[in-house]
Image (spheres, rainbow, N blue to C red):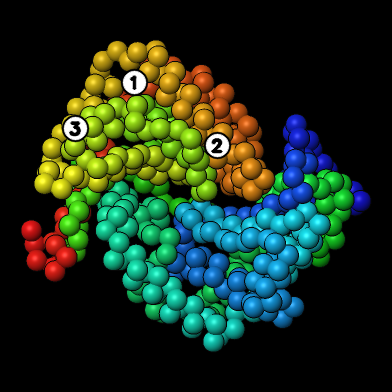
Amino acid sequence: MESIQITTMGPVIRTTLPNGLQILLKEIHTVPLISHWVWYRVGSRDEIPGQRGISHWVEHMLFKGTPEYPARLMDRVISREGGVWNAFTYLDWTTFFETMPADKIDIALRLEADRMQNTSFDPLEVESERTVILSEMEGKENDPLQRLGDAVQQASFDIHPYRHPVIGEKSDLKIISREDLYQHYRRHYHPGNALIGIAGDFQAERMLERLIELYRDIPIGPEADRSVAREGPLTAERRVEVRGPGSTTYLEVAYRAPTAVNPDFFPLAVLDSLLSGPMSLNMFGGGGTSHKTSRLYRALVETELSVSVYGGMQATIDPFLYHIGCTITPGRKYEETLAVLDDEIKRLQDEFVKPEDIQRAIKQARAMFAYGSENITNQAFWLGYAEVFATYSWFTTYMDRLQAVTREDIQRVARDYLRPEQRVVGVYLPTGSNGSEQ
């Protein structure tokens, strides 16, 4: 093996190749599967005016093939060998993954190394995907919750790129060119801006040798400037109203949330478990825990003010949002729900919280996190995901940090973050299925 520095963190080994590619490997020999993730440090946060949505579009193009792996062949080979694959673009990152039978993983390794440098960006495919993405956007525009969420997100920021939807802006998507896409690909999709996380049934030394063989000759690209405009605090409540077809009213309340590495992230996660039920930080979700013991469920759903209530936040590089959403019961007013929600937050800020309630909230939050971390695909996901906004130790210490949260921590973050002047209140008001206002 070439002379590179390797470090070990418990069951995880990590290294960085001379071209900047970071690699994290975790052997798990419970089943003959391997999950392989390639992460790029680029998302909607890194886009410039006139090119909103370009990262998501480039993600699509990486499925359109290379000279060695044409598009139809890529999909056919993965499926034929019993594998699954997909990709996601978000605020801070883009990722591609394959979960394969262990003896077939080399297909995925070769494929990802190839499309990191040889994706074709055929002009006909570019135009085809323009149509696909604009159609996808139109579908989202017909979704009340998507429309409300986008409006609240935009109102929550004035200058930070988090205000823009990941899918982009329609005016930009109509003018982005093949050359724009290709240059974005060359700037961001290279070893120096990438991280590979692999978990499963393999021998780490042999896997590392194979990755070095595949990636060592891919040149590093330009260093990306990831600096963004700093967003000032909200100083007055903002309200947004969205009207559209349907018969259901939706309420969304969003507060500025801390970054994932801020110590306040952890008590706010427990607060969320106590208030609206435990959240899942994993894109594949969790399970096995009930939201019916949460304060807002009892105050809103059991009293039939709302059909459902949910909350949560994301682990991000910059401060993003903690949101609470409600589906309003037919015949009730969203103002009633908002008043009760505010009362519950005030109680949490001012009144004594029973130790047993805190411990139940912590237990449920820990369980949700554990359920979203247990299989091979999720283990590989966390190897890279945590490194995008922090380090892998963020993942390994997460449950201990939840367990250390105190009543004083919860009430402090409730008072600091859940203030009316620091929030956006959004409501979707239905006009009826025939477009006439009810």
Is residue 65 positioned above or below 107 on the image?
below
Q: How many C-alpha atoms fall within 10 Å of the one at disc 3: few (<14), some, or many (≥20)?
A: few
Which residue has dot 1 on it?
A: 411
Judged from the image, the secondary structure of the residue bearing numbered disc 2 is helix
Q: CA distance from mark 1 to mark 2?
A: 27 Å
Is residue 155 positioned above or below 364 on the image?
below
In primary-sequence order, the first of circles 1 and 3 is 3
Q: How many C-alpha atoms fall within 10 Å of the one at disc 2: few (<14), some, or many (≥20)?
A: some
Q: Nearer the viewer's eye, disc 1 or disc 2?
A: 2
Residue 282 horizontal side relative to residue 292, left or right: right
The one of 215 and 140 positioned closer to us in this rendering: 140
Q: Residue at x 75, y 31 (%)?
A: 10
The one of 231 and 435 positioned closer to us in this rendering: 435
Q: Is any part of residue 221 visible from this angle? A: no
Residue 424 horizontal side relative to residue 265, left or right: left
Quarter of the image holding residue 431? bottom left
Residue 336 coordinates in the image, percent (x, y): 13, 37
Quarter of the image holding residue 189? bottom right
In the rendered structure, which amino acid carries the disc numbered 1?
A: Gln
Q: Residue at x 15, y 34 (%)?
A: 339
Q: Residue at x 54, y 54 (%)?
A: 93
In primary-sequence order, the first of circles 1 and 2 is 2
Query: Marks 2 and 3: CB-CB under 8 Å?
Result: no
Q: CA distance from mark 2 to mark 3?
A: 30 Å
Residue 76 coordinates in the image, percent (x, y): 67, 73
Which residue has dot 2 on it?
A: 371
> Residue 303, labelled with which disc?
3
Is residue 72 positioned above or below 163 on the image?
below
Q: How many C-alpha atoms fall within 10 Å of the one at disc 1: few (<14), some, or many (≥20)?
A: many
In primary-sequence order, the first of circles 2 and 3 is 3
The one of 258 and 87 positioned closer to us in this rendering: 87
In the rendered structure, which amino acid carries the disc numbered 2?
A: Tyr
